[in-house]
Image (cartoon, helix red, strand yellow):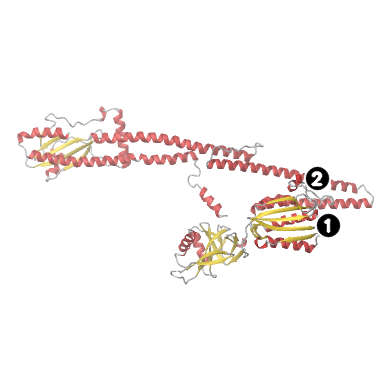
């Protein structure tokens, strides 16, 4: 499993919401924000509590001021003063004597400025408001004041009792029948008794209810807008995805010959990119299916010819008595059998080629050495008809490409065989290699009659063959150049046939192919080290130490912290361009030795770019003067030294890697 695959899996995993459709998820996200806005209702309760505290303190101050005013007037002026103060404050005033008996009451004097309202005499709107008050108080856990009831004497009021016991002011919040607050406060009037104020603070409840209504209207409007926008967003996302999903299902089921996957050209976002990618994928799949069908038809056609010839020859053998004719028929049978064998071999290779190339691991190849070796082998076997091979490798020190050696050898062999078959007796075949920027162009040129212009592309088609007139029929399957083009295109290159004119009437057939690559210095491409390796955040950490030094133990501790095993004990390090990648030998891939438990199988990764080397030692520099660097397969890798037995060793490795990467 590659790092990119694991990262993609992590990004695409939806643990708790993977079974929920997109529309509810979009609505849930937006409604969650609205729920936070609805928390303003609870803020209003806090606002109400602060107002009540302020008004309660104000009631206490008013009671003290009224008590001081009553103490300074004559008894005959006291009733008039209490009426005037009751009108000014809006509160009902009562004066109790030292025994708790009511002396003066502004209501008895005719002033009814504090009247309680009862629910049975109010409309449905007030009932709904009271219900909402009760519900919010229950949710927020607000304290519930005691119900306000009239008392028989003064000492039945807790404020009067508290004020009579000393020179203090006492205030209390009560709950009226309609859930509005009632504020009472009492203060001692020296020599005259205790004065008590009572006020129904309906304005507090009214203010809170008005603000709550306004917030409800805003919340309702925002909720409607948010839901509509969420549905619109869900529609722009979910509906195209459903269309694409239905089209993909039709492609999978193959119910129609031409299933059109919508490309959504007007969408320039990720949905449009997905639609066009799926459309291109379906077209590519259809092209691959058509190519497979055409290939099967071509194979059938090509196989029928030698089979028909073989059948005719075998049937004729039983009818012919002449030994000469029988020998000719047996020769035909042998040729047809050889032709069938060659066809089956080439068809088998061509049918597997695409899949094998998609799984191939490219390595840096020295094309100069490869071509020189192949030419040496060809000359050692002897080149037929006195044909000479000439190789110009003046640019050999820069002939490094990324590719699969066996496949590129097959391309060169095919072109060389083709050139030999077309070359005249005693002719010269010239091979040259020239670097063109990031491509390496290899040319095979012969002195043959050439290829007609209209056939220079056809010869790269399967089962298309243009052979010299002198060559016997059936010696080639017609797949060689088709296989060569497939291999070259998999290496991001091209392959062509052209006619090069020299001096006079001389012509040459030039076959050339180019493969991607860039020049690098001549250093080893691969090394095997006695190290354990783990992957941390997509980068390999090599853990080096002697046997028994704790390599596997440190790797196991890092795995416990989220790392993934690459290899235990031995690691193959391969240079790819300027990078060094690590993987495990096939025999120990996914295996780690845990002392006391044995060899365990764990998840592992391969071909991970190396981030740094950790050297295990018990002698550590407290403050390293300079970072250490080691060269592996031509790549410079930073190295640190740590004590593997220290508890903080895994943390030090992670910190060092983070410092190296960022």
Q: Provide the residue designation for mark 1.
A: 425
Query: Is 149 placed left or right of 498 in the picture?
Result: left
Which structural element holds mark 2?
helix
Query: Is 134 placed left or right of 332 in the picture?
Result: left
Query: Is 182 placed left or right of 225 in the picture?
Result: left
* Label 1–label 2 contact, CB within 8 A: no
Instruction: Relative to 424, say whether 85 is above or below.
Output: above
Q: Nearer the viewer, residue 61 or 188?
A: 61
Q: Nearer the viewer, residue 202 or 434?
A: 434
Farthest residue, direction bottom: 619
Would you call the spot at circle 1 few (<14 residues within 10 Å), some (14-19), or many (20 or more)? Answer: some
CA separation in Å, label 1 and label 2: 34 Å
Q: Position of residue 330 (x, y in %)?
A: 88, 52
Identify which residue is drawn at 68% across, 60% down.
Answer: 367
Farthest residue, direction front: 504
Q: Position of residue 366 (x, y in %)?
A: 67, 61
Which labelled disc corresponds to residue 585?
none
Q: Position of residue 111 (x, y in %)?
A: 14, 30
Identify which residue is drawn at 38% across, 40% down.
Answer: 35
Which structural element holds mark 1?
loop
* First in residue order: circle 1 vs circle 2: 2
Total of numbered circles in the picture?
Answer: 2
Which labelled disc corresponds to residue 304?
2
Identify which residue is drawn at 60% across, 38% down.
Answer: 261
> Can residue 302 be seen by looking at this rendering?
yes
Q: Position of residue 312 (x, y in %)?
A: 87, 46
Q: Nearer the viewer, residue 390 or 290?
A: 390
Query: In what quadrant of the picture does the N terminus appear?
Result: bottom right
Which of label 1 and label 2 is nearer to you? 1
When asked about the image quadrant of residue 163, the answer is top left
When asked about the image quadrant of residue 529, the answer is bottom right
């Amino acid at each position: 499993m590659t790092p990119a695959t694991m990262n993609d899996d992590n990004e695409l995993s939806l643990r708790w919401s993977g079974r929920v459709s997109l529309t509810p998820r979009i609505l849930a996200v937006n409604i969650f924000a609205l729920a936070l806005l609805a928390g303003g209702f609870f803020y209003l309760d806090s606002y109400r509590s602060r107002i009540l505290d302020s008004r309660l303190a104000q009631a206490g101050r008013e009671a003290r001021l009224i008590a001081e005013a009553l103490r300074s007037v004559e008894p005959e002026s006291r009733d008039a003063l209490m009426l005037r103060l009751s009108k000014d404050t809006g509160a009902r005033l009562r004066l109790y004597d030292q025994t708790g008996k009511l002396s003066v009451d502004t209501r008895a004097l005719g002033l009814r400025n504090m009247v309680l309202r009862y629910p049975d005499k109010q409309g449905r709107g007030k009932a709904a408001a009271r219900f909402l008050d009760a519900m919010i108080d229950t949710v927020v856990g607000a304290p519930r004041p005691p119900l306000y009831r009239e008392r028989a004497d003064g000492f039945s009021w807790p404020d009067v009792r508290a004020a009579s016991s000393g020179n203090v002011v006492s205030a209390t919040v009560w709950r009226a029948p309609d859930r509005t607050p009632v504020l009472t406060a009492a203060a001692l009037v020296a020599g005259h008794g205790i004065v008590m104020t009572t006020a129904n603070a309906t304005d507090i409840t009214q203010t809170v209810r008005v603000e709550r209504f306004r917030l409800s209207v805003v919340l309702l409007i925002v909720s409607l807008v948010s839901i509509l926008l969420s549905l619109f967003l869900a529609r722009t996302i979910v509906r195209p995805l459903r269309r694409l999903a239905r089209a993909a299902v039709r492609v999978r089921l193959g119910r129609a010959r031409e299933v059109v996957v919508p490309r959504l050209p007007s969408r320039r976002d990720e949905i449009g990119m997905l639609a066009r990618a799926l459309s291109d994928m379906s077209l590519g799949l259809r092209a691959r299916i058509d190519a497979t069908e055409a290939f099967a038809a071509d194979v059938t056609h090509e196989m029928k010819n030698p089979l028909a010839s073989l059948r005719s020859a075998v049937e004729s053998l039983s009818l012919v008595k002449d030994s000469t004719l029988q020998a000719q028929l047996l020769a035909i049978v042998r040729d047809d059998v050889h032709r069938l064998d060659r066809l089956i071999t080439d068809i088998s290779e061509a049918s597997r080629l695409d899949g094998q190339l998609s799984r191939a691991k490219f390595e840096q190849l020295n094309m100069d050495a490869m071509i020189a070796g192949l030419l040496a082998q060809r000359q050692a076997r002897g080149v037929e008809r006195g044909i000479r091979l000439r190789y110009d490798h003046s640019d050999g020190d820069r002939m490094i490409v990324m590719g699969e050696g066996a496949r590129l050898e097959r391309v060169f062999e095919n072109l060389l065989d083709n050139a030999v078959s077309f070359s005249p007796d005693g002719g010269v075949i010239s091979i040259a290699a020239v670097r063109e920027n990031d491509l390496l162009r290899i040319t095979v040129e012969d002195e043959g009659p050439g290829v007609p212009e209209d056939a220079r592309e056809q010869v790269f088609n399967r089962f298309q063959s243009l052979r010299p007139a002198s060559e016997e029929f059936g010696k080639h399957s017609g797949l060689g150049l088709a296989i060569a083009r497939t291999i070259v295109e998999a290496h991001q290159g091209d392959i062509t046939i052209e006619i090069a004119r020299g001096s006079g009437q001389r012509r040459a057939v030039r076959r050339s192919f180019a493969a991607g690559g860039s020049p690098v210095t001549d250093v080893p491409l691969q090394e095997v080290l006695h190290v354990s390796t783990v992957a941390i955040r997509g980068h390999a950490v090599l853990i080096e130490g002697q046997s028994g030094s704790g390599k596997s133990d440190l790797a196991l501790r890092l795995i416990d912290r989220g790392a993934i095993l690459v290899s235990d004990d031995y690691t193959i390090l391969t240079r790819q361009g300027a990078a060094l990648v690590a993987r495990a030998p096939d025999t120990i891939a996914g295996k780690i030795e845990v002392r006391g438990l044995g060899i365990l199988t764990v998840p592992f990764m391969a071909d991970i770019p190396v981030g740094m080397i950790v050297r295990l030692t018990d002698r550590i520099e407290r403050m390293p003067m300079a970072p250490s660097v080691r060269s592996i397969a031509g790549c410079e890798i930073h190295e640190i030294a740590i004590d593997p037995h220290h508890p903080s060793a895994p943390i030090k490795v992670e910190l060092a890697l983070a410092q190296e990467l960022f």
